[in-house]
Structures are given as structure tokens and as C-alpha cells.
Amino acid sequence: MKQKLIWLLAIIFISGCTTMSKESCQTQDWQLYASQKFVNSPASFSSINSMAHEACKEHGISPNLDELKAGYIAGVKSYCTQRNVWESTLKGEDVVVNYCPASVRANLQKVLISAKDVYKLEQLEQEIIEKQNSINTLQHEMYRIESDLQAKYASRAPQHEIDVLIASLNSKRAEILNAQNDLSQKHLKAGQMRRRANKYQKYND
């Protein structure tokens, strides 16, 4: 079991390291490389440095360490801002602040939590709209059944035909009631989330 785990971890590590062509290794802007790596997937400098070296290892080419460091710092400065954390989270992106400087990490974590709440609220409000539309559709279907039932009564249709419509009507009413209860719960939850969200302001630098 232990050997299988080690083998699996090795595969994951290798799959995460993209080997570059010799030409790419020779012409690569390592500052840009490190910056983009951090912005796309925040990690420690040692991790990004290892990925860069692994990518060109088979060609015997070593990345420029100073450029990597400069790029890493640039990536951190770009990523670890209130604006980026706020806007990226509202887009539904998975934001990680664990590798941001300790001096700003706690504040960014607060921004992240706030943005997640607002994002969840926006998602819930969309669910409310969809649920209300669903209820409207169900109600129209119920009105149609009621109209058909009245027509059956007026035409003195056989009782079994009337019974079928009555059963359908009762089923539709129960469906509407369940949907309305669900909608009420969503409204209640949205109200609670909205009160929390009102305490937040959009974070801009």
C-alpha cells in the first residue's frame, strides 16, 4: 500500500511539472514565468523554483534565479491585493491567500470571507428567481387543470374522468405548496446573508 501511495504521488508530481522545449528554456522570460505561475496557482517560491528547474532539467539549462525571484515578488504583489481577492472571488474563482505575505494575510482572509458571502448571496438570489419562475409555471398548470375540471363538470363527464383531474389538481397544489415553502426558506436565508453583506464594502486599493 505504501509503495502504491508513493507511486501515485510521483505521478501527480510529474504531471504537475511541464517539460519545456530546449528553445523555450533558452528564451524563457523567467520573471514572467514565476509571476504567472503564482497568479494562476499561488505556491511557495521553492515550489515554483523547483517547477522551473524541472521543466528544463533534461536540457541541462538552469533558470535565472534572480529573474525567478523578481517574477515571484511581482506575482505576489499583483495577486495579494484586496481588489484582486474581492473581484476574483465574486467571479467564482478559487482564491488562496496562504502564500501571501504574513503582514497582509489576515486582512485578505477577511476580504475573502466577505466576498464568498456576497458571492453565495448572488447565487441564492438567482435561485430565488428561478424558483419563483417555477412556481408561476406550476400555477398556470394548476389554473389549466381547474379550467378543465369545470368543463368536465359542465359537460357532465363520467366521474372517473373528473376523479383523474381532481387527483391531478391536488398533486399540483401540493407541488406548489412545497415550492412555496422552499422559496420562503430561501428568502429567509437570503435576508440573513443580506444583512451580513450590508456590513461589507467592496474592497478596492
Image (spheres, rainbow, N blue to C red):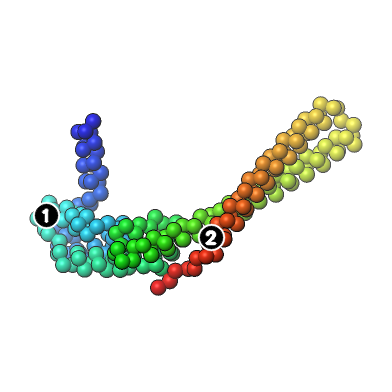
- Quadrant into which the C terminus falls: bottom left
Q: Residue furthest left?
A: 60
Residue 26, horizontal then vertical, whole percent: 14, 62
Q: Amino acid at mark 1?
A: His
Q: Is residue 185 left or right of residue 153?
A: left
Residue at image point 46% right, 57% down: 116
Task: Select label 1 or label 2 by which is in front.
Answer: 2
Name the one closer to the observer, 32 or 184: 184
Q: Which mark is residue 196?
A: 2
Residue 109 in the image: above or below residue 141: below
Q: Secondary structure at mark 1?
A: helix
Gap in angstroms between the C-alphas marked 1 and 2: 55 Å
Note whether residue 129 is visible. yes
- Quadrant into which the N terminus falls: top left
- In the picture of the structure, the residue carrying the numbered disc 1 is 59
Question: Marks 2 and 1: in contact by CB < 8 Å?
Answer: no
Residue at image point 24% right, 38% down: 8
The answer to which of marks 1 and 2 sits earlier in the sequence is 1
Residue 158, horizontal then vertical, whole percent: 85, 27
